[in-house]
Amino acid sequence: MASPLIDDRELLAKLVGLDTTSARSNRDAIDAICDYLDRPGLRLHRLAAGEGKENLVVEAGPDDGTGSGLTLSGHLDCVPTGEGWTTDPFELIERDGALFGRGACDMKGFDALAINALARAASQELSAPLALVLTCDEEIGGVGAACLVDSWPSDHVLPRSTIIGEPTLLKVVRMHKGHLKFYVRIHGSPGHSGNPTAGRNALAAGASAVGVLSGIAKAFQEMRTDTSAYFDDVSHPVLAVVGMESGQAWNIIPDECEIRCGLRVLPDQDAAVVLDDIRDALGSALKGFQWELVVYNDNPPLCTSEEAEVNDLACGAVRQDRSIGVSFCSDGGHLAKLGLECVLWGPGSIEQAHQADEFISLEQLNLGADLLKAAITQQCMRSEKG
């Protein structure tokens, strides 16, 4: 027997109560959602994503394979709670017109709305497909979405128009930068630090490499592309040195050095070409040393066409006449490889994401529910849209 429907706020409380920090397995959350969505009319697909993680795809309506209808997409994982909370991070608390809890904004608020939308759709007559995609490990680089792309059957077509409910204050975002993480690893040779001619100092070479990378980062600040105009906050690509490790002891010349970097390219840039330029610049600085640049994770940019049906749908709903780009990532760059046309469009503010006392306002949650219901009606419940 199907579980009784509960309201969005109660469902959000249940999701917040499940610790889905990226370092943990998400199977308890997947189990709970599958139990709730175990209803006639819904087709559930659990897909292994490695290390005790799963992705979930739920479908309702006709399986017509045309790409019509609507896909709703969210991630279940959250960043660690950290310090500074004045409430229990895993208990949804209402205060001053807002709901507090880890993930309430990013992005279990939208997840609750989307899960309930599928639960309601189970008992409705849909004229076009409605799908829900819930991923793991978005917060560590879109890892779950990348696994989904690899594991999803190529002949199983999901609805092309896709709403990713990242917190955008319900503004429509059709493009974002990518985030590629890479290492520069430098190999020298050890020696006694009492002899300045002993060994080959990989750390000193690393300092030169950081100088080169910093110069590239500064040059990027003057770089503009055709999509720069859509990025109000940071309109250029970004290269950031975020970590450096080297050295074993006070009396040993460091023979290894590892530099960690993050590269955020604009949607109309090719990250591979940019990396080649970075390699060329480092090669000049690291002559005489063995070294390599190794990509750790690549979360690609998103650039959905302004003419895409989902962009028209969402922009029309909120009367938005200008395209927007953001500097944070989503699963959209990966999901686009499945032929999905994605926009970010969800309740809550990204300013609250990853913070202590994370919250979503009740006003945003309720407005998001109304807009999502209208979008489903328009895309999935009429044989002819008008």
Image (cartoon, helix red, strand yellow):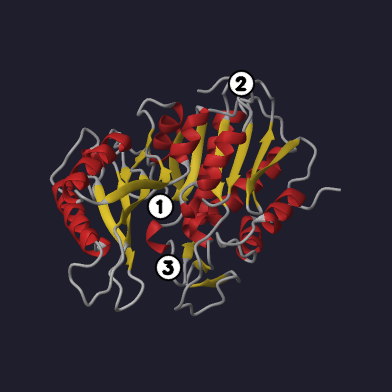
Mark 2, residue position = 383
Q: How many marks on residues?
A: 3
SS category of the residue bearing label 3: loop
x and y, in percent, of residue 259 in the image: 31, 58
x and y, in percent, of residue 246 in the image: 33, 66
Residue type at tag 1: Leu
User: Quick one: 277 or 364, which is closer to the camera?
Assistant: 277
Mark 3, residue position = 355
Q: Residue furthest right?
A: 1
Taking the spot 70% from the left edge, 44% from the top edge, the residue there is: 119
Counting residues from the N terminus, which is met first, the one under dot 3 or under dot 1?
1
User: Quick one: 322 or 106, which is closer to the camera?
Assistant: 106
Residue 53 shown left or right of residue 367 in the figure: right
Mark 1, residue position = 169
Taking the spot 49% from the left edge, 67% from the top edge, the residue there is: 98
Q: Is residue 65 above or below residue 110?
A: above
Counting residues from the N terminus, which is met first, the one under dot 3 or under dot 2?
3
CA distance for labels 2 and 1: 30 Å
User: Quick one: 222 or 229, which is closer to the camera?
Assistant: 222
